Image (spheres, rainbow, N blue to C red):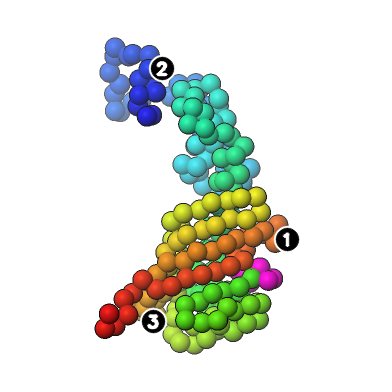
Amino acid sequence: MFRRFTERHLPRHTHALSVDHIPYTPRAKRALEYGVEEAQLMEHTSIGTEHILLGLLKEKEGMAAKVLHALGMRLVETREKIAIRSALTATNETFMEAFRQGDAAALAATYTTNGQALPPQSDIITERSAIQAFWQGALDMGIKAAQLETVELESHGDTAIEVGKYTLQGEGGQRLDTGKYVVIWKQESGQWKWHRDMWNSSVPVPGQ
């Protein structure tokens, strides 16, 4: 779809471009500058592809912007989605760091005040004090690290739904478990936190 659209609208060039020197058009430079501005507005410390995407949308007049608009992408909506993904990623990184530090209180602080954890083969765990006790038990069992990988993310106002994969590690990086999770996020006091946290293992039960 991208190729067909651009082939219909881009002018044909009769000269070849050198790999050693590909000049930027004024619009390309402007889009990159806009991308830097977007990163600064979000207080990000590096420029990523998401910022360049916003720069292309903000530039408006270039072919890339026209293609993106034809696909239904809009600057404000895309900026909001990127900001939400960035905030959620930061919270997940805080959770993973808390695991590395063995800090059950910090793990529980990832949840909303009325948050719930729904672990496999267990009742629903409600309130931060109970959630903290649960994660303290996991740490005491020898779980030293947790790796989270977002697979899918949707946002709807002050609610977001994340589907992902996890890996739990023990001493020396030993893999203890792998599985998948679903987290329902809510904004609380301006911060994105886990409101409902559900997961289960992908490791087959022995003998099955």
Query: Which SS class for mark 2?
Result: helix
55 inside magenta stretch: no
Viewer can see residue 28: no
- Residue 17, numbered circle: none
172 on left or right of 34: left
Residue 147 occupies quadrant: bottom left
Q: Quadrant of the C terminus?
A: bottom left
Q: What residue type is labelled 1?
A: Ser
186 on left or right of 98: right
Asked if 60 appears above or below 121 in the picture, the reply is: above
x, y (%) of residue 192? Answer: 63, 59
Which one is in front, 12 or 112? 112
Cα distance in 3D space between marks 3 and 1: 36 Å
Residue to which mark 2 is pinned: 9
Cα distance in 3D space between marks 2 and 1: 47 Å
Q: Give the range drawn in magenta.
A: 109-114
